[in-house]
Image (cartoon, rainbow, N blue to C red):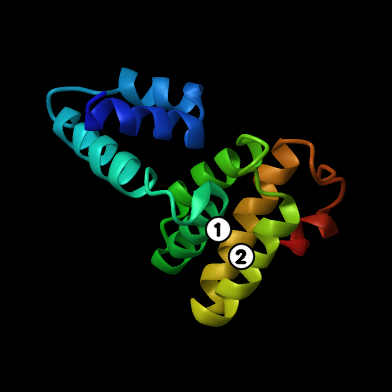
Amino acid sequence: MNDYDKGMVNRRRVLGDAWVDKSIASSNSFNDEFQDLITRYAWNEIWGRPALGDKTRRLMVLSTLIGLKAYDEFVLHVRAALDGPDDSRLTPDDIKEVIMQAAIYCGLPAANHAMALATGVLREKGLLPAITSASDQNEA
């Protein structure tokens, strides 16, 4: 198996088939080399390393994305972490702890926005109650 194929196995395991299929379907002559690069390097060379395991890497990625204020990627990885395989799946409490830690090390505005985004994903997945009143909207 070549580096791309090994990376694709990891990418599908971490992000899920639906997301990866969507990514591949949107590949074009402009971005296909980039997709190849991230699949070989990020998903093979980094996610394929055995030392930390997927759960630890998930926690690190979420924290890093908050620090970078890369909120679209943060939401993608929150969803993937909640839906991942049992041995690497994160709980809402795991995600909350990442955000709490990031509040101190990355700043309150970044963590506040991440908390609001994660809250939205948790509601979307039925892991938190839906907003029922205007006062509920202020909790995030």
Residue depicted at 39% across the width and 45% down the height: 47
Q: Where is the N terminus found, in terms of image quarters? A: top left
User: Residue 55: percent from the left, percent from the top?
Assistant: 57, 50
Residue depicted at 44% across the width and 63% down the height: 64
From the viewer's perspective, tell me whether residue 133 is left or right of residue 16: right
Quarter of the image for residue 8 reads top left
Quarter of the image for residue 39 reads top left
**Is there CB contact under 8 Å for labels 1 and 2?**
yes
From the viewer's perspective, tell me whether residue 28 is left or right of residue 127: left
Label drawn at residue 98: 2
Instruction: Give 109 or 54, whichever is nearer the viewer.
Output: 54
User: Residue 92: percent from the left, percent from the top?
Assistant: 73, 52
Instruction: Give 60 or 24, whichever is nearer the viewer.
Output: 60
From the viewer's perspective, tell me whether residue 88 is left or right of residue 76: right
Residue depicted at 58% across the width and 47% down the height: 78
Residue depicted at 47% across the width and 54% down the height: 71
4 in relation to 77, above or below: above
Residue holding disc 1: 59
Q: Amino acid at mark 2?
A: Val
Q: Circle 2 — which element?
A: helix
The residue at the far bottom in this view is 104
4 in relation to 71, above or below: above
User: Residue 35: percent from the left, percent from the top?
Assistant: 24, 33
Q: Amino acid at mark 1?
A: Leu
Q: Circle 1 — which element?
A: helix
**Marks 1 and 2, the one that precedes in the sequence:** 1
Quarter of the image for residue 126 reads top right
